[in-house]
Amino acid sequence: INSTPKFHPRQKGLRWHIDLQPWAGPAQSLDEEAVRFLRYIGTTQIACDHISTDSMATDSSPAKKPWSVCLDDRFGLAHQIRNKQCRLYSLGLGNEDTHFEVSMANNGCEVHRFDPSVKSAHILESQHLWYHRLSIDWRDPHPAVAAQKPHSNTRKLGTILNEFGHHKIDVLKADLESAEWKVLENLILEDVLEQIGQLIFEIHLHWPGFEVSGSDSSVVRFWYSLLKELELKDFRLFHSYKDLTKPQLFLKRDIFNASSCYTLSWVNTRWK
């Protein structure tokens, strides 16, 4: 009897690449891919009745990005906030605008801000706001590099969660200036998504993004396939914001009436 165990490539931790969606059309053209992708990011998949943005900021302040969370009772975030058990991770690269983080902290959330540009790690006691001089990447430092620089400030999100002993993040906000595609891919491949309740990602479309290569049409197909993976993990898009203050560039061209920057919010409908 052959007792060798069958190999199941879908087991946890064994995925090396995401599943690419079929091409949008027979021509495998940029036009077909872009139309499908832009329609997808512009169409919400679930209605959220209580969307909270950080528009609590005074009107005199400059226009704020709509970092939107869903506070419908069925998704648990409002409950976590009421019980002071909410945890927000904010991934940024030198962005000064922390209105959203401060307002979530003031609501009783434990907020961790990861930004390699902060001068030093510190805590704003009054605000439950932790600043970490760390950048979230799609890979951990190479062991040889890590040995030379034991305090390297780059980590994968899953590694940070393990290091901090955090098993769940209620809200993950990311503004990574084009590193978001590879970071999102890493969260999918390593099954970190099931530890996250809501995702708010700023996505950038003016170029393929860090370490994303291929023809323009295959880049857009890759972007689309990443977002479809979120859907397969029961994440649903509840808010989409097209930033008209940014150049209207799509892969370096002024086409499709697209902004180069969108802010998308998803809720994990399986979140307990």
Image (spheres, rainbow, N blue to C red):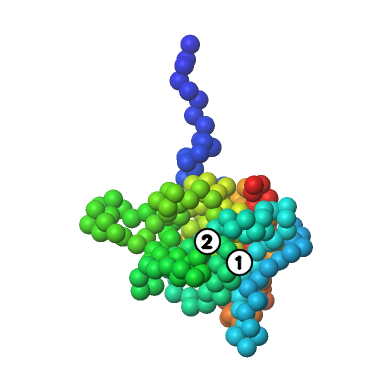
Q: Which residue is mark 1?
A: 107
Residue at the far top: name it: 1
Does any portion of residue 105 appear in the rendered image? yes
| Spot occupied by residue 192 in the image (x, y as percentages of width and height) | 52, 49
| Residue under the point 42% across and 68% down | 123
Between residue 255 and residue 97, name the one nearer to us.
97
Tell me the amino acid under the disc marked 2.
Glu
| Spot occupied by residue 198 in the image (x, y as percentages of width and height) | 61, 57
**Distance between the alpha carbons at the discs numbered 1 and 2:** 9 Å
> Dot 1: few (<14), some (14–19), or many (≥20) neighbours within 10 Å?
some
| Spot occupied by residue 76 in the image (x, y as percentages of width and height) | 67, 53
Question: Is residue 257 found left or right of 104 in the rendered image?
Answer: right
Question: Residue 200's image quarter?
Answer: bottom right
Secondary structure at badge 1 equals loop
Q: Which residue is mark 2?
A: 110
Tell me the amino acid under the disc marked 1.
Asn
Question: Is residue 90 found left or right of 152 in the rendered image?
Answer: right
Mark count? 2
Secondary structure at badge 2 equals strand
Question: Residue 149's image quarter?
Answer: bottom left
Between residue 3 and residue 12, name the one nearer to us.
12
Residue at the far left: name it: 148
| Residue under the point 65% across and 76% down | 56
Between residue 269 and residue 20, name the one nearer to us.
269
| Spot occupied by residue 267 in the image (x, y as percentages of width and height) | 66, 56
| Residue under the point 77% across and 63% down | 49
> Dot 2: few (<14), some (14–19), or many (≥20) neighbours within 10 Å?
many
| Residue under the point 65% across and 64% down | 69
Residue at the far bottom: name it: 60
Does any portion of residue 44 appear in the rendered image? no
Disc 1 vs disc 2: Cβ atoms closer than 8 Å?
no
